Amino acid sequence: MKQVNLALDLSLLVPGRPPNSPPDIFNEFENLIGKIDSLNLELYLVADINTNMLPGAVDVNSPKLRNICDIYSLIQWIMEPTRVTAQSQSLIDICKTNTPYKIVASGVMTLDISDHFLVYLVGKAHYTNGWMC
């Protein structure tokens, strides 16, 4: 999992969870989110989590992930499938933030080179004395 601090009050997480990884990986994820929350940082999470977050999907890990996101008020911006095959569709690529008022657009773009689609967030930003805020 990679954490990038872009400014003193901003954290961007870009984790990837391999398929069939042990469920305790979500404990590490929760610890990291807790640390970011305790520092009162803005959090932008863009991730391929290999856990189906579509409503009604049967996935043993989705309740744990939903619980973590509820605890830390992480809002999901992507609500449509992000991976589509001939046999299934799932929402396994997520975009979440604890500052939803700073998001102006989000979406999913189909790519012809992969069965994973591109997910994105567009946020508000302004510059003060040469620093992005």
Image: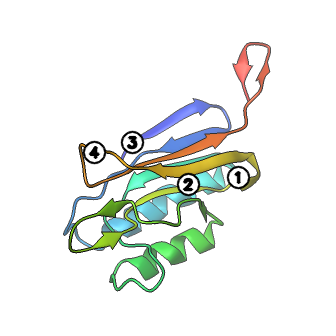
User: Which residue carries the number 1 mark?
Assistant: 99
Query: Can you see residue 53?
Result: yes
Label 4 residue SS: loop
- Residue 41 in view here: no
Q: Earlier in the sequence, mark 3 or mark 2?
A: 3
Mark 3 or 2: in front is 3
Q: Is 117 situated left or right of 87 in this image?
A: right
Mark seen at residue 11: none
Residue drawn at the location 54% of the way across and 34% of the way down? 5
Compute the Cα span from label 4 to label 3: 27 Å
**Residue 103 or residue 132, whichever sits in front:** 103
Cα–Cα gap, marks 2 and 1: 16 Å
Q: Position of residue 91 (x, y in %)?
A: 40, 67
Give the mark, 4 or 1, whose residue is nearer the N terminus.
1
Q: Which residue is mark 4?
A: 112
Label 2, label 4: how far apart the Cα atoms are: 38 Å
Kindly identify the amino acid type of the residue bearing the numbered disc 1: Thr
* Image disc number at residue 2: 3
Q: Which label number is shown at residue 35?
A: 2
Q: Nearer the viewer, mark 2 or mark 4?
A: 4
Residue at the spot x=53%, y=66% of the render?
A: 79
